[in-house]
Image (cartoon, grey):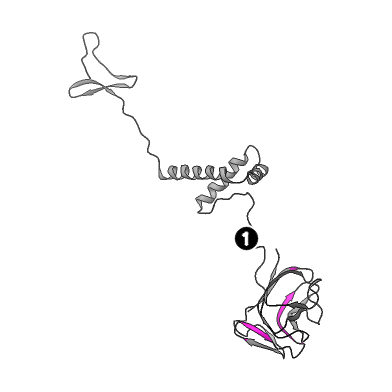
């Protein structure tokens, strides 16, 4: 709108409400103020998306997990705020959202201690008479009460996860685990001969004594058998 100054008002300037007075070639005009629209940055969009995703996830986790967040949070930070803060870090680093404040232990065992436990070749193991290597397993012929072994230093009183597989047996596999000096390697109930059929086996065992070799002693009381996938890991 074009404004014309009069005899008493010779100059017009300033703003009234949403209108502002501007000078132009045609004279003094009354125009609407421009709206300053602030553009959101990519970081702001990302943060909003992360927050929405985290809030939605809070709604679907179970009540026991929400209680854990409330339990471990310290004032003035609430359990929800700690959940948001933690998971914002997760998403910012391309990590999965956490439903619990306590990390999930995916593998409760230490590294593998047995070398060549699948008998992919004949390395690492020392075979006595009555035992023979085959690609992928070791065969016990039940002709002698003899052992296979590999050098391995173990302390007494340590908990391990012991695992192995019996692929074949003519009757049943009869063997036990022995320490250097012929003493039983593990405490009861795994301190005697195992009497097993074909299958996969895993036991939580505790070493009964110190040893510098890991022995598997076969007995001709049983039959022939094929053994593979021998594994020993410390329980963390």
Residue 79 x/y as whole percent: 62, 41
Residue 159 location, quadrant: bottom right
Q: Is residue 109 magenta?
A: no
Q: Quadrant of the N terminus?
A: top left
Give the vertical position of 130 relative to 80 (above or below): below
Residue depicted at x 75% and y 69%: 205
Front in this rendered view, residue 36 or 115? 115
| Range shown magenta | 134-159
Residue 129 location, quadrant: bottom right
Residue 39 location, quadrant: top left
Residue 10 lies left or right of residue 231; in this view the side is: left
Q: Which residue is mark 1?
A: 106
Q: Residues within 10 Å of mark 1 (few under 14, many from 20)?
A: few
Count the numbered circles shown. Answer: 1
Residue 213 lies left or right of residue 117; in this view the side is: right
Residue 82 x/y as whole percent: 60, 43
């Amino acid at each position: 709108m074009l404004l014309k100054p009069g005899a008493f008002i010779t100059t017009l300037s300033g703003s009234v409400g949403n209108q502002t007075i501007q000078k132009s070639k045609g004279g003094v005009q009354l125009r609407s103020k421009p709206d300053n629209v602030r553009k959101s940055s990519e970081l702001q969009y990302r943060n909003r998306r992360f927050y929405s995703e985290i809030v939605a996830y809070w709604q679907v986790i179970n009540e026991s997990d929400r209680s854990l967040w409330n339990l471990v949070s310290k004032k003035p930070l609430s359990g929800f705020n700690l959940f948001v803060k933690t998971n914002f870090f997760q998403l910012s680093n391309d990590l999965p959202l956490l439903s619990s404040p306590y990390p999930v232990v995916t593998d409760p065992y230490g590294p593998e201690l047995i070398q060549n436990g699948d008998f992919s070749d004949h390395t690492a193991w020392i075979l006595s008479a009555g035992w023979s290597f085959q690609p992928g397993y070791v065969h016990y012929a039940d002709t002698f009460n003899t052992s296979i072994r590999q050098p391995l230093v173990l302390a007494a009183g340590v908990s391990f996860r012991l695992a192995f597989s019996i692929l074949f047996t003519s009757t049943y596999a009869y063997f036990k685990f022995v320490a250097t000096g012929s003493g039983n390697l593990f405490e009861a109930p795994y301190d005697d001969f195992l009497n097993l059929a074909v299958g996969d086996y895993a036991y939580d065992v505790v070493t009964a004594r110190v040893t510098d070799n890991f022995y598997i002693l076969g007995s001709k009381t049983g039959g022939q058998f094929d053994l593979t996938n021998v594994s020993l890991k410390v329980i963390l």
